[in-house]
Amino acid sequence: MITGCAGANEPLNETRAEAKAENAAAKSDQKQKNLPNIRMLATGGTIAGADKSKTSTTNYKAGAVGVDALIEAVPELQDIANISGEQIANIGSQNMTNQTLLKLSKRAGELLASDDVDGIVVTHGTDTLEETAYFLNLVIKSDKPLVIVGSMRPSTAIGADGPSNLYNAVKVAGSKEAKGKGALVVMNDRIASARYVTKTNTTTPDTFKSEEMGNLGVIANDIYFFNDIAKKHTKETDFDIAKIARLPQVDIIYGYQSDGRYLFDAAVKAGAKGIIYAGSGNGSISDEAKKGAAAAMKKGLAVVRSSRTKNGVVTPNPELEKAKLLASNSLNPEKARILLMLALTKTNDPQKIQTYFNEY
């Protein structure tokens, strides 16, 4: 009789078990629906780097790990976002080209325009991360969170910083507080504006700093924002990635004692449409270099003075302004190049270009 009763109850028990499993699955699905939808765009770099030695932090292959492996390596991401990935490139960021930059930016713009995407995380090598971040800050027409992240140690190293940085980046990209703040760089528990942050050390994990302007926030379990960016960005700029097919060549010339005009002549000959001069101090330019700048400007090039010091504002100079030699404001040479490239897609007017440097 007992056996018979158990047999009679088996279909009912199975039905209850199935219903319980369906309810659990439904709750799980509902939980996932309540999470932000974050798309990761991977470009390679140290965060995707690998080496046979766990103690190697400088000799490794950048971009050895694909986007799916990056996501799988941090299973905790599933607790904070519906995360999916795309491989845009798999390179060391020293090999980031204008073509790849455009590809990445156009894809980010397309995704952010979709109702199915709440935020973007871009994984990137640190060497030129600030340039890509600033470019995105100027061309993406969305106020949804856009976070650029990297690491200073490869994924195989003892104490790899990539997983923590990646988790924090996804967390910020999914937060409502990050909306409308432009492109953000999340590294080493700090949240920085793409406009202000720069790499300051060749190897240490705390290399990215906003020394002069300050970070926008920190991550200490929770996200804490305490600053806003004063410069125009994203939806406020004149630049729209959907309308940019090609970027003009802009070169950087480094100022030093006994420099001459021949580097300017070489840039003109090589097809440059603009030049950034990384001058000493407050964008100082030697008399010989000034001759080169003047010759370049006579041939229609825009020339902008920046500073090799990395901090401070390059202030306007009445004499140089009269000669249409522009000032980069507080942009370092590499970011000044990014802005000048974009400015030249809109205008050749020195006054308008100077306005961009003052406002962006």
Image: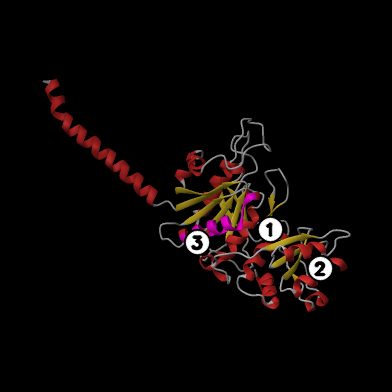
Rendered image coloring scheme: secondary structure
Quarter of the image that includes the N terminus: top left
In the rendered structure, the answer to whether residue 124 lies left or right of residue 320 reads: left
Q: Which residue is drawn at the image coordinates 70% and 67% (left, top)?
A: 274
Report x, y in % for residue 179. 52, 61
- Label 3 vs label 2: CA separation? 39 Å
Q: For mark 1, give the secondary structure.
A: loop
Amino acid type at mark 3: Gly
Q: CA distance from mark 1 to mark 3?
A: 27 Å
The answer to if 146 sits in the magenta stretch is: no
C-alpha span from label 2 to label 1: 36 Å
Question: For the residue marked with disc 1, what is the amino acid?
Answer: Gly
Res. 285 visible in picture? no
Location of mark 2 (residue): 292
- Is residue 101 covered in magenta? yes
Quarter-of-image position of residue 202: top right
Dividing the picture into quarters, in which one does residue 97 lie? bottom right
The residue that mark 3 highlights is 109
Give the camera-side residue of 193 and 335: 335
Query: Which of the two labelled residues, at mark 1 and mark 3, occupies the earlier sequence position?
Result: 3
Label 3: few (<14), some or many (≥20) within 10 Å? some
The x, y position of residue 269, in whole percent, is 73, 64
Identified by mark 2, the residue type is Gly
The magenta segment is: 95-110
